[in-house]
Image (spheres, rainbow, N blue to C red):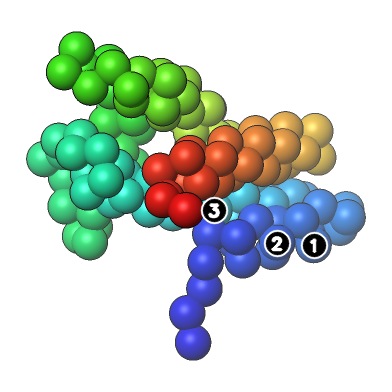
Amino acid sequence: MSVSAGDFLESARRLLSHSEEMDQRNVASRAYYAAFHASRQLMAQCVVSMEIPSELDPSARIKHARLMGWMSGIRPDAAKPDQDETRKAIQRLGPILRSAYQFRELADYQITQSFPPEQAAQTFEQCERLLARIEAIHTRLTPP
């Protein structure tokens, strides 16, 4: 059995209603991993369909910072002006993923600090929006 980025997000959504701090920490972690896996899939699609170069192998283990850097580093290509809006949309996703990553790090590693439900909810909302934006880009890149 395999899972999808959406499955991670749904797991986070179910945990949102739980009041235990550990559940709130898991909301941030699961939501971030939904965004991370969706971003990896987006990168793989862009490398093929848009011929956006990447030194990262989408099928290999990818370090989080390198994926965020790839997203944030995408620039318009004068030879492909029809891709400008898509490239800008991907570039805007990098800081959102980085913010979610920082919340996930707090949730997973800073266990002596409290992790309030507001942080979990903020991370979830960021990641939910990021997945929606990635889905819109996927739709734009997928031929009818």
Query: Residue 61: x and y, percent?
Result: 24, 57
Look at the image and tell me whether residue 26 can be seen. Answer: no
Residue at 53% across, 59% down? 5
Who comes first in sequence, dot 3 or dot 2? 2
Question: Please, what is the three-letter code of the amino acid marked with disc 3?
Answer: Ala
Residue 40, numbered circle: none
- Image coords of residue 96 (percent x, y): 52, 27
Counting residues from the start of the chain, the first of labels 3 and 1 encountered is 1
Viewer-side residue, 39 vs 99: 39
**Residue bearing mark 1:** 14
Mark 3, residue position:
34
User: In the picture, residue 49 is in which quadrant?
Assistant: top left
Amino acid marked by disc 1 = Arg
Q: Is residue 83 above or below residue 130?
A: above
| Residues packed near mark 2 inside 10 Å, few (<14), some (14 to 19) or many (20 plus) | some
The front one of 26 and 138 is 138
Find residue 113 and report its horizontal and vertical position in percent: 65, 36
Q: Which residue is mark 2?
A: 10
Q: Secondary structure at mark 3?
A: helix
